[in-house]
Image: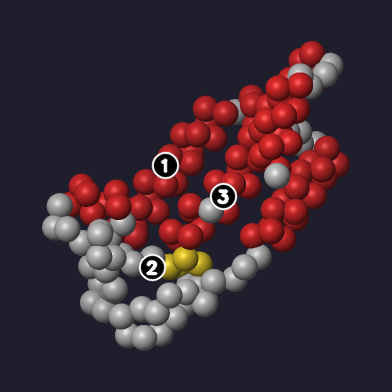
Amino acid sequence: LGVPLGDGSRLRYPMNGHLAFWLSLSACHLLPLFGGSLTYVYDNYLQLAVASMALSLLLSAVSYASSFRAGCELAAGGNSGNVVYDFFIGRPLNPRLGSLDLKACCELRPGLIGWAYLNMGMAAKQFAMTGRVSAPMACVNAFQLL
């Protein structure tokens, strides 16, 4: 359970990130069965980066706009009155889509699992181009998975 809110209630946070990581890693090995490859990450890095920034901006705008609803609990640091500061820090305390906490989700799960996928995609491309994975690339991937 999360920390007590202003009204005394606590939000529930499912602790299934470890399971999600291993399921995602397993799905990664199924890509060739469906005609996919991890080299897609390397080949489309710019498109993936732009799409992730666009999605981040969209979620931020929706979160900020939703903070003006009546009854929305505001974050202490994100309610300064400076629109630019409040937008980037986050005005609502716990923006949610249903039971999905947007701040917790966007900070943790896609970032950490996505980072591992990026590293594996770079290693896959290096292997496809050179026939081997270099020691530094192997170290980056190994340390990321720790």
Circle 1 sits on which residue?
54
SS for dot 2? loop
Q: Name the residue beneath numbered marker 3.
A: 110
Question: What crowding class fits label 2: few (fewer than 14 Cα within 10 Å), some (14-19), or many (20 or more)?
Answer: many
Per the model, the C-alpha gap separating discs 1 and 3 is: 15 Å
Identify the secondary structure beneath mark 1. helix
Answer left or right for 110 relative to 62.
right
User: Residue 30: horizontal and vertical position, in percent?
Assistant: 82, 45
Q: Earlier in the sequence, mark 1 or mark 3?
A: 1
Pointer 3 with pointer 2, Cβ within 8 A: no
- The correct choice, above or below, for 13 with respect to 42 in the image is below
Q: Does the image show residue 67?
A: no
Measured in 3D between alpha carbons, the distance from the residue under mark 3 to the one under mark 2, in whole angstroms, is 18 Å
Residue sitting at x 33%, y 67%: 93
Using the rendered image of the protein, determine whether residue 12 is visible from the camera's viewpoint. yes
Using residue 95 as the reference point, say whether residue 145 is left or right of it. Answer: right
Identify the residue position indicated by label 2 in the image. 94
Q: Residue furthest top?
A: 130
Q: Is residue 107 left or right of residue 140?
A: left
Q: Which of marks 1 and 2 is nearer the N terminus?
A: 1
Residue, x 31% and y 57% (percent of image)? Answer: 90
Look at label 3 and name its amino acid: Pro
Please name the amino acid that badge 1 sits on. Ala
Residue 66, position as x, y percentages in the image: 30, 65
- What's the coloring here? secondary structure
x 64%, y 60%: residue: 17
Q: Are marks 1 and 2 in contact (CB under 8 Å)?
A: no
